[in-house]
Image: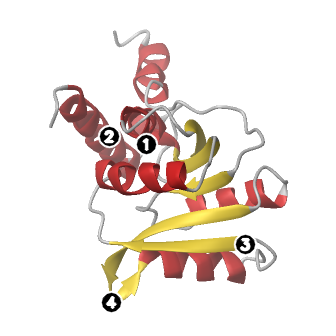
């Protein structure tokens, strides 16, 4: 195992990443939980490239009386994405499952057929599974935003990457057993 660590250790991380190539969609949906702005910037870039006309941003309350969605949108605008149409989805969601239960029916009601869902690279597989379990429509296409604190090829060299891998695998196992 030591001799071949460069092959199997990245595989542990890359399993968590389940991203598709972008395609035209009715909307882009940014999941909450990003403290560095990687998700919102990736979503804004997809919108700017014409994959969808609006970016819906999930954002729970709790950051000094602000919603994460408002802070994310402001961050993107300060980064030069003032031309992108953002819609803040202010909420009290505590998990991806909460977001799926709240917004998948809303997207169906809005008549969306295809939604690009942007989240951190390490979160794509589990998030996609949770969102798809909430219904077959709209069709979900996972988009991985590169995470500054998760590098699948050499995650074992950095403490925060190790913690992110451990936490995401723990959450993945928990969701597999219905927790």
Q: Do callouts 1 and 2 mark residues in contact (Cβ within 8 Å)?
A: yes
For disc 2, the marked residue is 168
Give the quarter of the figure containing the N terminus.
Answer: top left
For disc 4, the marked residue is 64
For disc 3, the marked residue is 85
Q: Nearer the viewer, residue 107 or 9?
A: 107
Q: Which mark is residue 123?
A: 1
> What separation in Å lies between label 4 and label 1 (alpha carbons)?
25 Å
Q: Nearer the viewer, residue 35 or 115?
A: 115
Say which label, 1 or 2, has the lower sequence index: 1
At mark 1, the secondary structure is: helix
Give the x, y percent position of residue 78: 70, 83
> At x 57% / y 55%, what residue is drawn?
29
Say which label, 3 or 4, has the lower sequence index: 4
* Front: mark 3 or 1: 3
> What separation in Å lies between label 2 and label 3 (alpha carbons)?
31 Å
At mark 3, the secondary structure is: strand
């Amino acid at each position: 195992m030591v001799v071949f660590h460069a092959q199997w250790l990245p595989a542990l991380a890359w399993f968590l990443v389940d991203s598709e190539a972008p395609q035209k969609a009715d909307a882009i949906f940014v999941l909450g939980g990003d403290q560095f702005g990687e998700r919102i910037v990736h979503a804004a870039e997809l919108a700017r490239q014409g994959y969808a006309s609006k970016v819906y941003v999930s954002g729970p309350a709790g950051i000094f009386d602000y919603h994460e969605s408002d802070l994310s949108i402001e961050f993107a605008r300060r980064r030069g994405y003032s031309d992108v149409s953002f819609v803040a989805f202010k909420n009290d969601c505590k998990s991806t499952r909460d977001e799926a239960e709240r917004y998948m029916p809303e997207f169906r009601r809005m008549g969306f057929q295809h939604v690009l869902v942007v989240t951190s690279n390490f979160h794509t597989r589990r998030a996609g599974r949770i969102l798809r379990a909430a219904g077959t429509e709209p069709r979900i296409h996972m988009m991985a935003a590169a995470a500054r604190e998760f590098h699948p090829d050499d995650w074992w060299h950095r403490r925060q990457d190790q913690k992110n891998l451990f936490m995401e695998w723990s959450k993945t196992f928990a969701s597999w057993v219905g927790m």
